[in-house]
Image: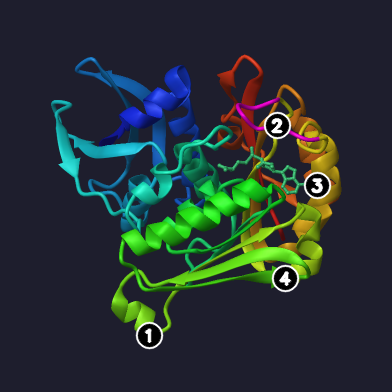
Amino acid sequence: MRFALLVSPAVNRVYAQSAGALATAELGAINERVLNGELTDLREQVLGSVSYLTFSATEPELTPLARTWLSNLSATFALFRLDADDRLVPLDLDRWDELDSDLLTIQKYAGKTNESFTKLLLNVTLAASAFTAEKRALSVLDPLCGRGTTLNQALMYGFHATGVEHDKKDYEAFALFIQRWVKDKRLKHTAVAGHVKGHPKLDLALGVDKERFKAGDTLRVSYVNADTHAIADVFQPRSFDLIVTDAPYGVQHGAQSGDGLSRRPLELLTSALPIWRAALRPGGAIGISWNDLVLRRDKLAQLLTENSLQVCDSPPYRGFLHRVDSSIERDLIVARAP
Ligand SMILES: C[S@@+](CC[C@H](N)C(=O)[O-])C[C@H]1O[C@@H](n2cnc3c(N)ncnc32)[C@H](O)[C@@H]1O
């Protein structure tokens, strides 16, 4: 049986020509890691003047596992089965989203990592981990978190989120935003602004609904305003299931003034990776996006390997390189902690 996925218009706007290729790579990585290759013949196909990502499955119905992952791909707008005449039969989506989607879209600022791309990076990192079947809320760390796009996407999925960022303005902006957002949504929550080892820290716990809050079933978000190297002092080793981060691009970006470290991604990653590695649980995975024009993939892969991480190097995981602008060609790399 053949199926078709319609890529969301928002994703098409972000990546322009690369949207189909990125969606194919995302589904390819998930198919390989989580779905044991049950989907075959993935390709872009035009049906009635519109481009779809199409694929085959041996059974007439998608398995529940395939359906749920397909529903949560970063590019998914709608999902269809193709009947014998290539007519589209719509299928229900089963989204993981626990919160309103404006959590991801309200904040707008120069240097924001696009929210669809952030979801893609989280998805392929999760897929590479040993935790895809876990029922508990996973814990996600973004060690260079800016104003928290990864943290927000992790919360959307019902995961606990931790961010570290040295820019004070980013910390203050996120702290203001998230507290206002939970109030506006009338979500039960607690928020504590304090310090850890001298660094400003916000801890917020929110209940997706009143009952879950009462039962102590909360989603926790913590944000520490510190240099990423402070992670070793602030968190216990093996505290996080997933590390997901968009590294500095090594170029002046929008209104961000940039600093020495931000302009040298290789130096930053070389010194920070051993610290991040220690924070990762066995079975966990790390996903990093970066600017391929200032740091070659092979060099980053070598760094990850030197830190006892297993790089995912199959064809889908090598299909994410895309142009952002004249000074940024973004790629992502994912590695597992054995
Ligand atoms: C590409 S941006 C990430 C943006 C973030 N994903 C967002 O959407 O807001 C990289 C971030 O790394 C931060 N950064 C660079 N060097 C750092 C360091 N040594 N410690 C902590 N943060 C750092 C920068 O300030 C910047 O916010």
Asked if residue 157 can be seen in this view, the reply is: no
Instruction: Determine contact: label 3, label 2, CB under 8 Å.
Output: no
Rendered residue at 48%/64% (across/down): 159
Residue under numbered circle 4: 196
Residues packed near mark 1 inside 10 Å, few (<14), some (14 to 19) or many (20 plus): few
Residue 257's mark? Answer: 2
- Which one is earlier in the sequence, the residue at label 1 or at label 4? 4
Instruction: Determine contact: label 1, label 3, CB under 8 Å.
Output: no
Residue under numbered circle 3: 305
Tell me which amino acid carries mark 1.
Answer: Ala
Residue under numbered circle 1: 215
Residue 310 vertical placement versus 250 (above, below)? below
- Which one is earlier in the sequence, the residue at label 4 or at label 2? 4
- The CA span between labels 1 and 4 is 27 Å
Picture coordinates of residue 108, whole percent (x, y): 46, 37
Task: Kindly tell me whether mark 2's CB lies below 8 Å from ligand 1.
Answer: no
Residue 86's mark? Answer: none
Residue 218 vertical placement versus 252 (above, below)? below
Quadrant for residue 129, please give it: bottom right
Residues packed near mark 3 inside 10 Å, few (<14), some (14 to 19) or many (20 plus): some
Picture coordinates of residue 246, whole percent (x, y): 63, 41
Quadrant for residue 116, please give it: top left
Tell me which amino acid carries mark 2.
Answer: Ser
